[in-house]
Image: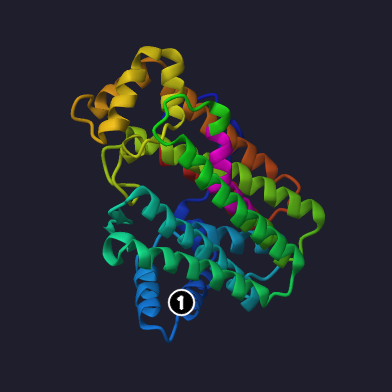
Amino acid sequence: MNTTGHTAAVEEPLLTARRIFSLITSELALVEEEFERQARSNIQVIAYIGDYLRASGGKRVRPALTLLSAYAAGGDASRPNVVRLATVMEFLHTATLVHDDIIDNAETRRNRPSINSRFGNQTAVLMGDWLYMSAFETSLQERSLPVLDILTAVTRKMTEGELMQLTHIGRADVSEEQYFDILRRKTAYLFSACCEIGAILGGGAGEEQRALREFGMNLGTSFQLVDDLLDFTSFTDSLGKAAGVDLLEGKVTLPLIYLLEEKPSMKSAVQSVMREGNYHEFPRELFTREAERAGALERARARASHFAEAAARSLDPIKPSKFKDALRSIPSYILEREM
């Protein structure tokens, strides 16, 4: 990805992903232990699926954001309540993945059989519900109305985002505004909640809470834009799922929105792929090539860079520290996935 002219705000001395995560290695280990503890149940099927989900891994980006934000706000992220809430954020994220995979009829998740394909839709629905309820049960231990308000709001917004997306499945006339509305609800609000809750638990002042909330919102937006670009351009399974599935599932993302703006004649091909559920008549390479020629990919990349820059600027009110440096490095790390 050529980001010349787009990433000036994030081209500071940057930490590598390994360095970012090394700052909170012991805390993330505590999150894994807490995940295992929260997933325990005397109901055998729940305990088994809980272990299956935990072993499926994931980058634990959302708990990491909660931990780093708590430290950046001046707190101690190794405290049990911070670890608990960081784990709650991963539970909420995992619950949405379980439900999303049912809706999308996904066969795999993180290169393993998805819960719905392995255990059936009925079990997967109930397991997702159990994860949501367990997350809220754990969060109640904090006895913090601000934290509960954030968690309630973000859970509602994620559900709204999924419902909104369902109403647009199979439609080629999705607008840029509609796309971003769905993206924020499904992805960015949870990033924002992770950072804001971290700030609250870290004892951050109102200004710091606002700064980290905005950081998370911009970061989550950039993160999803890059994910959508990778789905559109990648021919590997680097996303932990098969590439190119968005269009097959009837989802029109930003690169396609920009392509259809420039070349309306591509609409019939887009509709055909969504209708048939395969690329037999119109290969993926066709869409990638036409999007590149039309400047749609560069426009989408520029939007991802814009939100990455905004995320980095959002941290200006935060006091200098190695944890602030780590947070400031994450937007560039996200963009690097697409370069």
Instruction: Using the rendered view, name the quadrant where residue 9 is placed.
Output: top right
Is 105 colored magenta in this rendering? no
Our reading of the magenta stretch's main secondary structure is helix
Is 191 colored magenta in this rendering? yes
Residue positioned 47% across, 35% down in the render = 168
The kind of secondary structure element at disc 1 is: loop
Question: Is 60 left or right of 201, judged from the image as shown?
Answer: left
Above/below status of 278 relative to 86? above
Q: Which residue is mark 1?
A: 39
For the residue pair 324 and 301, the one nearer the viewer reads as 301
Residue 150 lies, in percent from the top left, at 69, 58
Above/below status of 335 relative to 97? above
Q: Quadrant of the N terminus?
A: top left
Residue 102 lies, in percent from the top left, at 37, 55
* Mark 1: few/some/many CA within 10 Å (<14, 14-19, 20+): many
For the residue pair 27 and 115, the one nearer the viewer reads as 115
Residue positioned 67% across, 61% down in the render = 197
For the residue pair 21 and 179, the one nearer the viewer reads as 179
Residue positioned 61% across, 41% down in the render = 218
Q: Quadrant of the C terminus?
A: top left
- Observer able to see residue 74: no
**Number of numbered markers:** 1
**In the rendered structure, which amino acid carries the disc numbered 1?**
Ala
Farthest residue in the right direction? 206
Instruction: Using the rendered view, name the quadrant where residue 256 is placed.
Output: top left
The span picked out in magenta is 179-192
